[in-house]
Image (spheres, grey):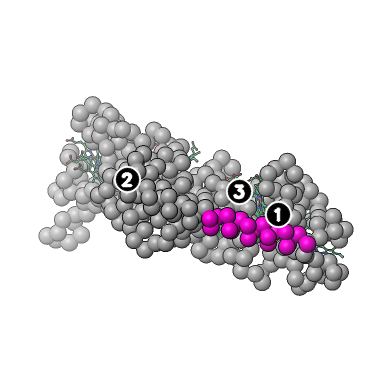
Amino acid sequence: MDNKHLHKIFKLAIEAKEESFVNFIVNQRKPLPTLKRNNYLWQFADVYTAKSDSLSDFISIKTFDNTTGSLRRESMRKVVLVLTIFLVSCFLLLFAAFMQKSAEANSGYVGVDTCKGCHEDKYDSYAKSIHSKKAVPNSPANREGCESCHGEGGAHVEKGGGRGTGIFNFGPKLSAKEKSAKCLGCHEDTKYLAFWNMGKHKAEDVSCDNCHSIHSGGDKFLIAGKSETCYRCHRDIKAMGNKQSHHPIKEGKVSCTDCHDPHGEFSRAMIKADSVNELCYKCHADKRGPFMWEHPPVEENCLTCHNPHGSNHDRLLVMKTPQLCQQCHDGAYHPGTPYTQFQSFTPPAKGTNPATQLVGRACLNCHNDVHGTNGPSAYGQRFLK
Ligand code: HEC
Ligand code: HEC
Ligand code: HEC
Ligand code: HEC
Ligand code: HEC
Ligand code: HEC
Ligand code: HEC
Ligand code: HEC
Ligand code: HEC
Ligand code: HEC
C-alpha cells in the first residue's frame, strides 16, 4: 500500500468516525485480531511507521491524535517538526505545479472551439454532458476542455488532424493505467473512486473507458445499462441470471451495482458491505434476527446455502433439500424417524444398513423456518411450524 492510499484511508476513517470503516480495515488486514477497535488504528500506524518516511510519520501521528483525542507530549514536538517539513514541501510542490501550468498555458493547448471545427459530433456529445458545464467546479470546461482528457492538441491540429498525430486517444494501444490516469486526475479524490486502487478491476487492467463512454454513453456515461455494462465481460454471471431462480436483475429491480462496487471495495469480491451477511441484510432485514433460536450456518454465511447470482433450485439454493441439509445433518437418528433400518428402503446388501441419507426427504415441510425463530421452546428450537 502506498503512502497516498494509506493517507486516504486514515482520513476517511477519521472523518467519518465510522466504526464500520475501521472494521473494514480490521477485516481486511487481520494481523492483530485480538485488538480492540479503538486501538487498531494506533497499532496499524505503528506497524506502518516502522518502515516509513516523514510523511507517513505525520499521518500516523495525526491519526493518533484524532482517534484518541489526546496527544502525547513527545509526539507534539515531532508533529510540529514534520508539519513544518510537510508545509514547506507542499508549498514547493504547489509552486512547481503553478510554474508548470503557466508553461503549459503557452504550449500545445488549442481550446475546444478548434476541435469543434473538425469533430462536430464529439463536440455535441461533450456539450450535452456534465463535463462541459462551467457551473460544475473542476469540470473539463473549467480546465482545458477536450484537452483535459485528450492532452495537448497543438501538434494534432498543426498536422491537419488524422490518426497517430500525437493526440491522446483512448484506444487499445495505450495501457489501462495510462487511460484511467486521465480520468483519475479529476476523480481520484471523490468517494466513488476512493478504493479504485484496491479493486480487482484495476488489478486486471480494466480501465474507466471499458465501462464508461464519454461520447456515446448513457446515464453516468455508461456504455450500456447498469448490469448490461457488466455482462460484456461477465458472461458466466449473466448465464446464471437466466436460471430458474435468480435475483430480479434482468427484470430491472436489482442491479449488479446494488451489491458490488465496480470501482473497488475493501471487501471480498468488491461487495458493498463488510461481509456477505451484512450485504444480504440490507434488503432481507427479516433474516437479521436477533433470533432466540439461531441456525449457525445462517449466522455464518448466507452463501452456504444460497448462490446470489442464480440457481436451478428453488430460492437460489446451492443444492436441493434434503441433500442441502444432510451435508451437515445425519439422517440416521432423526426423532420420530419415518424410516429406520427395520422398516425402510431395502438394504443395499445383506448385513449393511439401508440408505438413511434421504430420511424425511422434505425437511422444509416440517422445518420451515431454517433462518432462525423466536418460537416457543422445542418448536422454535427445531425450526418447526
Ligand atoms: C483540422 C481538423 C482537425 C482538428 C482541428 C482536430 N482534429 Fe482530431 N482528428 C481529425 C481527423 C481527420 C482525425 C482522423 C479521424 C478518423 O480517421 O476517423 C482526427 C483524429 C482524432 C483523434 C483520434 C486520434 C488517433 O490517434 O486515433 C482524437 C482523439 C482527436 N482527433 C481529437 C481531437 C481534439 C481533442 C482536437 C482539439 C484539440 C482535435 N482532434 C482537433 C481532424 C482534426
Ligand atoms: C477536468 C476534470 C475531469 C476529467 C479529466 C474527467 N472528469 Fe468526469 N467529471 C468531472 C466533474 C467535475 C464531474 C461532475 C461532478 C462529479 O460527478 O464528480 C464529472 C462527472 C463524471 C461522471 C458522472 C456523470 C453523471 O452523470 O453523474 C462520470 C461517470 C465521469 N465523470 C467519468 C469520467 C471518465 C470516465 C473520465 C475519463 C475518460 C473523466 N470523467 C474525466 C471532472 C472530470
Ligand atoms: C467495471 C465497470 C466500471 C469501471 C471500470 C469504472 N466504472 Fe465508473 N461507474 C460504473 C457504474 C456501473 C456506475 C454507476 C453506478 C451506480 O449508479 O450505481 C459508475 C459510476 C461512476 C461515477 C458516478 C458516480 C455516481 O454515482 O454519481 C463516476 C464519477 C465514475 N463512475 C467514474 C469512473 C472512473 C474515473 C473510472 C476509472 C478510474 C471508472 N468510473 C471505472 C462502472 C465502472
Ligand atoms: C472526460 C474526458 C473527455 C473529454 C472532455 C473529451 N473526450 Fe473525446 N474521448 C474520450 C474518451 C474516453 C474516448 C474514447 C471513446 C469513448 O469513450 O466514447 C474519446 C474519443 C474521442 C474521439 C474518437 C477517437 C477515435 O478513435 O475515433 C474523438 C475524435 C474525440 N474524443 C474528440 C473529442 C473532442 C473534440 C472533445 C471536446 C469537444 C472531446 N473529445 C472531449 C474522453 C473525452
Ligand atoms: C472490460 C471487462 C469488464 C467489465 C465491463 C466488467 N468487469 Fe468485472 N471483472 C473483469 C475482470 C477481468 C475481472 C477479474 C477476473 C474475474 O474475477 O472474473 C473482474 C472481476 C470482477 C469481480 C470479482 C472481484 C473479486 O475481487 O473477485 C466483480 C465483483 C466484478 N468484476 C463486478 C463487475 C461489475 C459489477 C461490473 C459492471 C458494473 C463489471 N464487473 C464489469 C472485467 C470486467
Ligand atoms: C444480491 C447481491 C448480488 C448481486 C445482485 C450480484 N452479485 Fe456478484 N456476488 C455477490 C456476492 C455476495 C459475491 C461473493 C461470493 C463469494 O464471497 O464467494 C459475488 C461474487 C461475484 C464475482 C466474483 C466471482 C464469483 O463468481 O464469485 C463476480 C465476478 C460477480 N459477483 C459479478 C456480478 C455481476 C456481473 C453481477 C450482475 C449481473 C452481480 N455480480 C450481481 C452478490 C451479488
Ligand atoms: C439490493 C437488494 C438485495 C440484496 C442486497 C439482496 N437481495 Fe435477495 N432479493 C432481492 C429482491 C428484490 C428479491 C426478489 C423478491 C421477490 O421476488 O419477492 C430477492 C430474492 C431473494 C431470494 C429468493 C429468490 C427466489 O427465487 O424466490 C433469496 C434466496 C435471496 N434473495 C437471497 C439473498 C442473499 C443470500 C443475499 C446476499 C448475498 C441477497 N439476497 C441480497 C433483493 C436483494
Ligand atoms: C442452512 C441453509 C440456509 C442458509 C445458511 C440461509 N438460507 Fe435462506 N433459505 C434456505 C432455504 C432452505 C430456503 C427455502 C425456504 C422455503 O422454501 O420454505 C431459503 C429461503 C430464503 C429466502 C426466500 C424465502 C424467504 O424466507 O424470504 C430468502 C430471501 C433467504 N433465504 C435469504 C437468506 C439470507 C439473507 C441468508 C443469510 C442471512 C440465508 N438465507 C441463509 C436455506 C438457507
Ligand atoms: C453447514 C452446515 C448446516 C447445514 C447445511 C444445515 N444445518 Fe441445520 N444446523 C447446523 C448446526 C451446526 C446446528 C446446531 C446444532 C446444535 O446446536 O447442536 C444446526 C441446527 C439445526 C436444527 C436444530 C437442531 C437442534 O438440536 O436444535 C435443525 C432443526 C436444523 N439444523 C435443520 C436444518 C435443515 C432443515 C437444513 C436444510 C435446510 C439444515 N439444518 C442445514 C448446521 C447445518
Ligand atoms: C415429518 C416432519 C419432519 C421432517 C420431514 C423432518 N423433520 Fe427434522 N424434526 C422433526 C421434529 C418434529 C423434530 C423435533 C423432535 C424433538 O424435538 O424431539 C425434528 C428434529 C430435527 C433435528 C434436531 C435433532 C435432535 O436430535 O434434536 C434436526 C437436526 C432435524 N430435525 C433435521 C431434519 C432434516 C435435515 C430433515 C430432512 C432430511 C428433517 N429434519 C425432516 C420433524 C421433521
* Distance (Cα) linking label 2 and label 3: 50 Å
Residue depth check, mark 2 versus mark 3: number of the one nearer the observer? 2
SS at badge 3: loop
In primary-sequence order, the first of circles 1 and 3 is: 1
- Identify the residue at image location x=39%, y=62%: 52
Circle 1 residue:
214
Circle 3 residue:
226
Q: Within 8 Å: ligand 3 and the Cβ of disc 3? A: yes
- Identify the residue at image location x=57%, y=48%: 190
Main secondary structure along the magenta-highlighted residues: helix
Circle 2 residue:
72
In primary-sequence order, the first of circles 2 and 1 is: 2
Q: Quadrant of ligand 1?
A: bottom right
Task: Inspect the magenta stretch and tell me whether residue 75 lies in it.
Answer: no
Q: Nearer the viewer, residue 367 or 161?
A: 161
Q: Nearer the viewer, residue 212 or 228?
A: 212
Residue depth check, mark 1 versus mark 3: number of the one nearer the observer? 1
Magenta span of residues: 88-106
Which three-letter amino acid code belongs to the residue tagged 3? Lys
Mark 1 closeness class: few <14, some 14–19, many ≥20 residues within 10 Å: some
Q: Is residue 292 above or below residue 198?
A: above
In primary-sequence order, the first of circles 2 and 3 is: 2
Disc number placed over residue 48 in the picture, else none: none
Quadrant in which residue 231 is drawn: bottom right
